[in-house]
Amino acid sequence: MENVKTLGEFIIEQQTDFHGSTGEFSSLLSAIRLASKVVNQQVNKAGLMSHILGSAGGTNIQGEDQQKLDVFANNQFIKALTGRKVICGIASEENDEYIPINNDGRYIIAMDPLDGSSNIEVNVSIGTIFSIYHRITPVGQQVRAEDFLQKGSQQVAAGYVIYGSSTMLVYTTGNGVNGFTYDPGIGVYFLSHPDMKFPAQGKVYSMNEGNMNKCSAGVKQYIEYCKHVDSATKRPYTGRYIGSLVADFHRNLIKGGIYMYPATTDSENGKLRLLYECNPLAFIAEQAGGKASDGYRRIMDIEPVNLHQRVPFFTGNTHMVDKLEELIKQEK
Ligand code: AHM
Ligand code: MG
């Protein structure tokens, strides 16, 4: 075991050369680590505990049914983050408004505590996504909306947990991307994927193609491009769509590929949320040598106007996102 490094060790190691080493940021990451373990345990039991499955009865701000595990995950993350006292506010997919916490905290967090939760009942991977910022308002005051409505380029850290065949925590603080695999037997995350990078050549495209006829001409053309036979560019690409953002993103990060959730005729901004789905994954994508765009602009340059705003989202290997942007920009 002498060559292995735990997430706990890694966090302490990074602390010395990060953010003035007050320990607050490490404490924040430890809270996420802890909550993810509790959620992981419950996710693994979901098939057994049928009372966990199904709707909790409420609907969230997007009018979607909340499942019980969403609520459980939300509560666990809020509890763990509140306990550490370093967070001054939380925005969550499951809460219509942001939650002020400790006025003396220096960090805010935006999160989707359990993304893809409609996949729970069919045993498909789901995830937690988080995005961390310094507050803008002075320490000591209650947080305000402007603390949350920061551009993605202001993120201090971002990451996700994938509850899959193994559970992994992947995150960046702007100095590369590192992935940790969870050993449930001993309750420890180990550094398994240091310095993650997209492979040079992406070969997978991931999109809900059922929506193709509701998409713009540029997106349609790109899908045709993906299917076109051309050995020089290794096409046709392989189509893979899980319908669970973290799982699709994680696979493309490791194997090389592009994830697309475009605008459709029903939903002019697509489906995914800028603050706690797109920005954190965009930060990771860029740190791994990839790219994230809304078809025209860098995701992390978009000025947010509300907590739950949606945005068309294209992310993955740079050469793939570049080609898609080229076709979108050309469309008549
Ligand atoms: P959710 O936040 O309600 O779980 O929805 C987000 C999910 C993503 O995980 C996934 O990429 C997308 O919705 C799938 O949408 P669709 O079923 O339209 O393809
Ligand atoms: Mg979500």
Image (cartoon, rainbow, N blue to C red):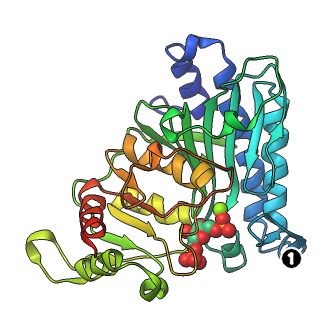
Residue 41 seen in the current view: yes
Residue 168: x and y in percent read 56, 51
Q: Position of residue 70 (x, y in %)?
A: 78, 62
In the rendered structure, the answer to whether residue 325 lies left or right of residue 264 reads left
Rendered image quadrant of residue 317: bottom left
Give the residue drawn at x 54%, y 60%. 246
Q: Is residue 242 left or right of residue 330?
A: right
Tell me the residue that label 1 is attached to: 50
Q: Residues within 10 Å of mark 1 (few under 14, many from 20)?
A: few
- Quarter for ligand 1? bottom right
Where residue 48 appears, as percent x and y from the top left, is 82, 73
Q: Residue at x 49, y 33 (%)?
A: 4
- For residue 244, above or below residue 32: below
Compared with residue 257, is residue 51 higher up or lower down, i.e. above or below? below
Q: Measured along the vertical axis of the image, is residue 81 above or below residue 316?
A: above
For this rendering, which residue is in front, 160 or 133? 133
Q: Give the quadrant of the C terminus.
A: bottom left
Residue drawn at x 57%, y 80% as measured from the top left: 266
Residue 239: percent from left, percent from top: 36, 79
Question: Which residue does the image show at 74% across and 40% down from the upper left?
Answer: 34
**Does residue 116 appear in the picture of this structure?**
no
- Decide if ligand 1 comes within 8 Å of the CB at mark 1: no
Task: Say what secondary structure mark 1 lies in.
Answer: helix
The amino acid type, in three-letter code, at marker 1 is: Ser
Q: How many marks?
A: 1
Picture layout, residue 229 above or below residue 190: below
Q: Nearer the viewer, residue 12 or 220?
A: 220
Name of the residue lying farthest toward the front: 332
Q: Nearer the viewer, residue 252 or 91?
A: 91
